[in-house]
Amino acid sequence: MDLLCCESTTKSVAQKDPTLLLDDRVFDTMLKSEIRCLPAPDYLATVQKDLTANLRKIVVDWMWEVSI
């Protein structure tokens, strides 16, 4: 399989994007879109009723373990 851009088989490194770093409009737009995309505060109580606090802890612990 061919590697793309700056990919490497030994180390995964993100490259700095000058568009994101040098233009404040990009960051402002991202903040505005974050506000629009936030879930409802009562999402876990109304939609995820079967996911109790104890199960959420187990899921978070599992996600942490698999991400390392």
Image (cartoon, grey):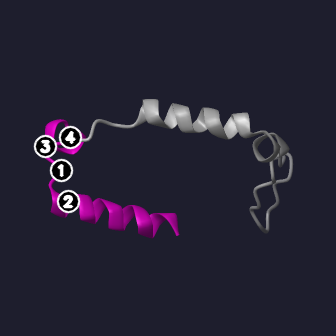
**First in residue order: circle 2 vs circle 3:** 3
**First in residue order: circle 4 vs circle 3:** 4
Residue 52 highlighted magenta (yes or no): yes
Badge 1: how crowded within 10 Å, few (<14), some, or many (20+)?
Answer: few
Task: State whether the magenta stretch is mostly helix, strand or loop.
Answer: helix
Tell whether 49 sits left or right of 65.
left
- From the top left corner, tell me how far across and down residue 36 is, in percent: 44, 29
The residues bearing labels 4 and 2 have C-alpha atoms spaced at a distance of 17 Å
* Residue topped by disc 2: 55
Tell whether 56 sits left or right of 1.
left
Q: Is residue 47 above or below residue 58?
A: above
Tell me whether circle 4 and circle 2 mark residues in contact (CB < 8 Å): no
Badge 3: how crowded within 10 Å, few (<14), some, or many (20+)?
Answer: few
The residue shown at (23%, 39%) is 43
* Residue topped by disc 3: 49
Q: Secondary structure at mark 4?
A: loop
* Residue topped by disc 1: 51
The numbered disc on residue 42 is 4
Q: Which span is picked out in magenta?
A: 43-68
Residue 59 highlighted magenta (yes or no): yes
- From the top left corner, tell me how far across and down residue 56 is, in percent: 24, 58
Q: Secondary structure at mark 1?
A: loop
The residues bearing labels 4 and 3 have C-alpha atoms spaced at a distance of 10 Å
Tag 3: amino acid? Lys
